[in-house]
Image (cartoon, rainbow, N blue to C red):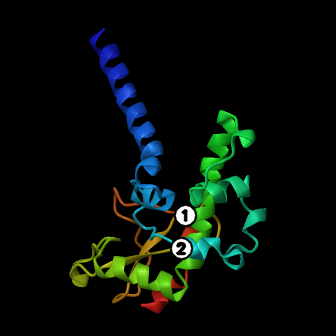
């Protein structure tokens, strides 16, 4: 009976955490800030909203993302009109699509001047972690996508060794390859 009670308490705590994560965007007003602050999304930098609002930067993404318009509105934190209410299932799809859309936008953004600067600042402060190799002496690493398939996880790249073969350490995010542009480490 005690084990069942403990399991129920753990489930309630997990549900509370999930609901607080989902409502986190309500508190600070920015879905992007909320999304980037989630555990596992440390490799993302915050994409400027004006970059996202420029239709040229989004060319071709509407065919890749389900519920594109709703997902874009979610990323930009635009209220959905009441007449466009979605079912709970559709809402889950839109949330997933918003994450996918942000990842694709992020991959394009980090190869722009502003995006490279944002990634460089995270690199400079070792936000992406440090190389585990002894001879690297704690050199900061960069996330890098080795290929475009969305199933390929990103890995860490060490500038001094020019090595991107080791996986991310335990507890570090494993973003998919397309969200981390392959050419980005070359720029640093």
Pointer 2: residues within 10 angstroms few (<14), some, or many (20+)? many
Q: Is residue 113 left or right of residue 171?
A: right
Image location of residue 127, percent across then percent down: 32, 71
Seen in the picture, residue 24 relative to 106 is either above or below; the reply is above
Image location of residue 120, percent across then percent down: 39, 83
Outermost residue toward the right? 63
Disc 2, disc 1: CB below 8 Å? yes
Q: Is residue 112 visible?
A: yes
Viewer-nearest residue: 93 or 114 = 114
Seen in the picture, residue 99 relative to 177 is either above or below; the reply is above
Image location of residue 48, percent across then percent down: 51, 74
Residue at point 39%, 27% (across, down): 11
Image quarter hosting the N terminus: top left
Seen in the picture, residue 112 relative to 15 is either above or below; the reply is below
Q: Is residue 107 visible?
A: no
Image quarter hosting the C terminus: bottom left
Q: Is residue 136 left or right of residue 88?
A: left
Tell me the distance, in whole angstroms, between the alpha carbons under discs 2 and 1. Answer: 7 Å
Q: Please tell me which of labels 2 and 1 falls first in the chain.
A: 2
Query: Which residue matches tag 1?
Result: 176
Q: Is residue 117 left or right of residue 112?
A: left
Q: Identify the image quadrant of residue 49.
A: bottom right
Seen in the picture, residue 24 relative to 14 is either above or below; the reply is below
Pointer 1: residues within 10 angstroms few (<14), some, or many (20+)? many
Query: Which residue matches tag 2?
Result: 145
Viewer-nearest residue: 8 or 168 = 8
Q: Identify the image quadrant of residue 146.
A: bottom right
Image location of residue 126, percent across then percent down: 29, 75
| Secondary structure under the numbered disc 2 in the rendered image | loop
| Secondary structure under the numbered disc 1 in the rendered image | loop
């Amino acid at each position: 009976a005690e084990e069942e009670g403990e399991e129920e308490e753990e489930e309630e705590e997990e549900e509370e955490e999930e609901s607080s994560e989902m409502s986190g965007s309500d508190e600070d007003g920015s879905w992007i800030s909320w999304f980037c602050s989630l555990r596992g999304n440390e490799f993302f930098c915050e994409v400027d909203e004006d970059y996202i609002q420029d239709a040229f930067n989004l060319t071709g993404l509407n065919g890749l993302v389900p519920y594109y318009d709703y997902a874009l509105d979610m990323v930009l934190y635009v209220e959905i009109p009441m007449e466009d209410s979605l079912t709970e299932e559709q809402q889950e799809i839109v949330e997933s699509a918003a994450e996918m859309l942000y990842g694709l936008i992020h991959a394009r953004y980090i190869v722009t001047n502003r995006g490279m600067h944002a990634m460089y600042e995270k690199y400079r402060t070792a936000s992406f972690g440090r190389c585990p190799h002894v001879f690297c002496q704690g050199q900061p690493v960069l996330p890098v996508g080795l290929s475009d398939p969305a199933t390929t996880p990103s890995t860490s790249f060490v500038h001094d060794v020019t090595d991107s073969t080791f996986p991310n350490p335990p507890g570090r995010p494993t973003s998919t390859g397309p969200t981390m542009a392959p050419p980005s480490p070359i720029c640093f």
